[in-house]
Image (cartoon, grey):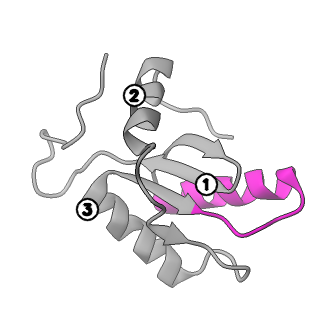
Amino acid sequence: MPTSKLTPRQRQHLKALAHEQKPVVQLGVKGLGEPIVAALREALRRHELIKVKLPKLDDAEERKALADEVVAASKAELVALLGRVLVLYAPRKDDLPDKPRIQLPR
């Protein structure tokens, strides 16, 4: 997995915020296509913190590899990989670049 800029405290804070959320994007067995990448980026632009449901895979290494692909394609930070659910974070940059909705602890 790629290294993250998030501290353990920030990651824990984001996991707590994501706990009650439902997955916004769901990947199928066809994998990561351009429409899915566009949906990921749009969801991150709107929400900053999203859950992504991965397809059912037998091998944990396959799941990690797919998670890495999703993180790279979405240009987001990986917060957590919990079973088949990925939690991604990308601070809002478009409308108010210095005012993200989610305030991270230091």
Secondary structure of the magenta portion, mostly? helix
Q: Residues under labels 1 and 2: Cα distance?
A: 17 Å
Q: Nearer the viewer, mark 3 or mark 1?
A: 1
What residue appears at the point 15 percent right and 46 percent down from the top-left corner? 97
Q: Earlier in the sequence, mark 3 or mark 2?
A: 2
**Number of other residues with Cα within 10 Å of mark 3, as a class: few under 14, some 14 to 19, many 20 or more:** some
Q: Is residue 87 left or right of residue 59?
A: left
Q: Earlier in the sequence, mark 3 or mark 1?
A: 3
- To which residue does mark 3 refer? 46
What residue appears at the point 59 percent right and 60 percent down from the top-left corner? 70
Q: Secondary structure at mark 2?
A: helix
> In the image, which disc is placed on residue 13?
2
The C terminus, quarter of image: top left
Amino acid type of disc 1?
Val
**Number of other residues with Cα within 10 Å of mark 2, as a class: few under 14, some 14 to 19, many 20 or more:** some
Magenta range:
53-74
